Image (cartoon, rainbow, N blue to C red):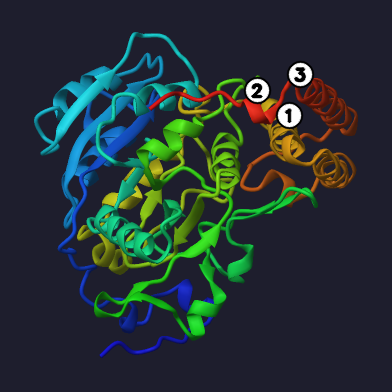
Amino acid sequence: MIQSACFSLTDTRTAWPDSWWPEPPRRLPEQREVDVLIVTRNRCPAAIDAMNPLAWLFDSLSQQENVTIGRVVVVNDGSTDFTLDVIRRYQDRLGAELLLVSDGRRRGSSQARNLGLRHCTADLVFLCDDDCQLTRHALGGLHQTYLLQKRRDPACAAVHLAFYQRAVRPEKLVASRQIGMVDERRGVFQTHLRSFPREYAHRPRWLDRQSALLAPLPIRHLCGVFLAERRAIAECGFPEDFPWANAFCEELELSLRLLARGRTLYHQPDPKFFALHYKAGWQDPAGPATVPAEGEFRCFGSVGRLNSRILAADQPRLDSGNRVDLETWCYSKLISYLVCLGRRSRPGGLRWMKRGWRAFVRDNSDQFYGHSSTKIESSVERARLWQAALRDGLRFLAKQDPRSAPTCGT
C-alpha cells in the first residue's frame, strides 16, 4: 500500500522518505516510440569521454528503461572541440539510431532545434539540454506521465521533467501555483522547476497509485527538458527572430504560442526520476557542489562519479552551449522578457522592465542575477544596459506581429 509522505524542507536536504521510493513507474500496455532531440555546442572539451558532458548524457540515454527510443537526433551547432569524435564513438552504443545533423556552422539553439525537429519521425520528442544526465527511469516515467495525462486532458502538448542543478533532490519547497507561472498582463513569471510543490509534501496527488506516480502540475513556462507532441511544437516553432545572443526565453515563447493555440503544458515534479543538470561552463561561487554517496547510489547506482563530473563541469567557459559574458546575459534577460511578455501585453512588458530597473539598476539584487558568481558593480553601466534593452525591445515589438509568428513546418 502506498503511504502518504509528510516532510519538511530539512528533509529535502537529507533524504526523501522511503514512501517516495516504491517500484519504478510501470510500463504501460500502450506504448509510443520517442525520439530524442539534442542541440549541442562545445560540450566535449576533452579527448576522453569521462570529461565530456555530452558523453554523460549519451551514457544515461543508453540506460533508459520502460521506454522505446526510436531515433536520437543530435544537431551540432558549430562545435570546435571533440564533439564530432564523441558522436561517432556513440553511434553503435546507444541502442537506437543516432543521427548527426551538422554542416559546421552555428545557427543558434532555436534555429538548430527547428532543424532537428524536421529530422524527427516519432509522434513524441524528448528535448534535452546537452549537459544533463538522466536517471534510468526518467524518460520512461515521463512517457508514462504523458500517456496517462493525455487520457485526462486531450489538449496536453508537453510534460516537463524534474531537473536539479548539480543535485539529486529538489532545492526547496514552493507553492504549486508558483511553479512554471507566467502572467503576461502583470509582467511576472516564476519557474521553480527545480523545486517541489509544498502541497504534495503533505498530501500528494497521484496520477498512478500502483507505481506512486505523482500527478503533474499545469504550467505556462517550459524550460530545457521536456517530452512533447512533435507536430504541436513543430507547428509553433522555436523563435528564430530573437536578436539577442543566448536564446533567452526561446522556450517561454514556444510555451506561449502553444497556450495560445489551446494546448496545455504540465510539469512532473516526481523526485523518483529526473535529470541532473551539470550546468557545464558555469562556476559556482560557493565552490563545486557535492552529492552525498547514498543519494548518488539510490538515483544512479554509482558512487563518486557525479562529484568528479560536477568538478569537471565547474570550469568557466564562454564558448559552449548558450553561455555569454555577464553584460550580455543581463541585457538578454531584460529584453527577452520584455519582448515575450510585451508581444501579448504591452503594459505587462513595461511592468517587467520597471521591476527590472528596481532589481537590476537600483538595487543590483541577488534575485536578478540568480546563480551568477559576479555582479555589474557600476550603476552607470547597469543603467546603460537597461536603457539599451528597453530601446531595442520596443523597436523589436514595433516591427513584429505575434499573429504571424514563424513556424518550422511539420
Among numbered discs 3 and 2, the one appearing first in the sequence: 2
Among numbered discs 3 and 1, the one appearing first in the sequence: 1
- Residue 400 x %, y %: 72, 22
Q: Nearer the viewer, mark 1 or mark 2?
A: 2
The residue singled out by tag 2 in the image is: 244
Among numbered discs 1 and 2, the one appearing first in the sequence: 2
Task: Write down the quadrant of residue 93 in the picture.
Answer: top left
Q: Residue at x 34, y 78 (%)?
A: 20
- Quadrant where the C terminus sits is top left
Amino acid bearing label 2: Trp
Q: Is residue 250 left or right of residue 101?
A: right
- Residue 178 x %, y %: 63, 63
Instruction: Say which element carries label 3.
Output: helix
- Residue 193 x %, y %: 52, 57
Amino acid bearing label 1: Tyr
Task: Write down the quadrant of residue 296 in the picture.
Answer: bottom left
Q: Residue at x 89, y 34 (%)?
A: 379
Give yes or no for contact between labels 3 and 1 (Cβ–Cβ under 8 Å): no
Q: Nearer the viewer, residue 184 or 94?
A: 184
For disc 2, the neighbor class at 10 Å (few under 14, some 14 to 19, many from 20) is: some
The residue singled out by tag 3 in the image is: 399
